[in-house]
Image: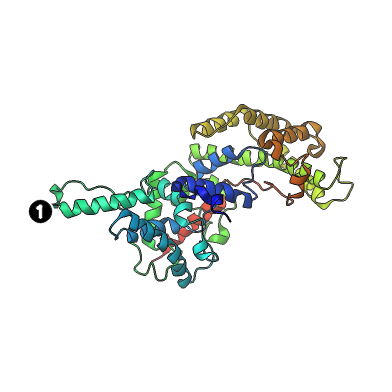
Amino acid sequence: MSSSAFGWYAVDPDQRRRMMEAVDQFRDMTTVDDLGIGGIRDSFSDVLFPGTSTLHTRLRYVLFVPWLMQVSAHRDTARQMQVVFRDLEYRFIEALGSGGETLGVFGRQSGRNLLRLPSVVYWGAIGAWGVMERGVTTHQFFERAVLRREEERRLPSAEDKESRPELTSTGIDVGLPAPPEDLLRSTTFTLRHEDAEYLSEAITRNRPDSLLAHLVTHRPATWTDGASAPDSAWDPRIREELPARLSGLVDRAQKFSTSVLGANLLYNLLVAEEAAGSVSRSAANGDETVQKYRDRLAVWSDEARHSPLVSEEDRLAIWEMVLGMNRRLNTTTRDFLSTWFDAAPQSRDIADDTTLRDLVRGRERQVKGAQARLGNRRALDAWGGASGAGRLEFRWSYARSHLQDIYDGLEAA
């Protein structure tokens, strides 16, 4: 890979995280965005589960990163600290291996060729949950560490410590638990009790209105382990204890997920038909992929006829949510979704509904231009059989993993 391919890697951690997440979404079939609804999907995700990412593997990295920063801060200059910190991120791969960890270890296969470092991937959570002051970069932390050390050196040796001037904050939360003694030798992803308590408090203090914070303190009684965890954020076991505002948000998320699934299934049907060389909009050629999407659309149509979908009131609330997060939401996106929300549930045969087929076809062209698959033989040949064909979950599986780690840690002695 040429150096220019990752020339942007030297920008600040927040930018790198967003870029890496955008790249990684092509590997997650629930996040591929052929119809231009990614901004709405991500808005729901960020409101429900702030700080989470589709790149997250294990929660304890949120603590590992600042701990490694603190270890690195014992050098003379900020530059030296930065170099040591980068080296420790690579060395830490071995510490996790010595602890017996294999799943979710960044760099377990690539070693020092690892490009997507934990400090980049988890920086959003570290800031969102108050583990690190928002907006502070790793380099700024090291610069502050140097300044603070100099301030401490110049302090008069007065016995009355309360009279001393306030020192520069490094940016790391003063409540962060001390790292385990064997951090750099052998460690695991298992949270200690004090780790879980700290993260619970940090999340609820910094993101109190989120579903993530609610679930930190309101674990469903039947959620006893990973196997019994709810399958979705709108599982009845979660819904029954939600306050009104969160209940409304989760309800809209469920309706949106169900509604747009139909549009994505119809899109995949259109692509499957063209890829199979069908010109009659039927499965008469016996293509299994075409028939699969026809079957899934039939199931979805039945669900849509018997489930509450996105109402006019829901739409206004969704538009307001997206714009309130400073995300782009243009008129064409709103028009496409409104037309789909109104027409799709009423269609008698959605797979062959000319109006809806034209709507979806036109939307892909509107979003992707010359890169659209439909009508593009080269793009069709590269299609893998599914693109965004999964039901939107708004990062629930990642949040569920984080919550399980916290629950297990709180139960630890």
Side (left or right) of 332 relative to 374: left
Q: Position of residue 327 (x, y in %)?
A: 53, 34
In the image, is residue 10 above or below residue 60?
above
Evaluate whether residue 213 shows in this view: no
Q: Please, is residue 258 above or below residue 225 in the view?
A: above
Residue 357 falls in image quadrant: top right
Is 8 on the left-hand or right-hand side of 135?
right
- For this view, does 171 lie left or right of residue 162? right
Depth check, front residue: 187 or 299: 187
Dot 1 corresponds to which residue? Answer: 158
Where is 68 relative to 265, above or below?
Answer: below
User: Residue 20 or 332: which is nearer the viewer?
Assistant: 20
Query: Which residue is painted at 41% across and 62% down in the image?
Result: 87
Q: Position of residue 160 (x, y in %)?
A: 11, 52
Left or right: residue 104 versus residue 84 is right
Nearest the eye: 344 or 382: 382
Dot 1 lies on which element? loop
Amino acid tagged 1:
Ala
Residue 399 image position (x, y, % from top left): 51, 52
The crowding category of the residue bearing disc 1, from other C-alpha atoms within 10 Å (few below 14, some 14 to 19, many at least 20), is few
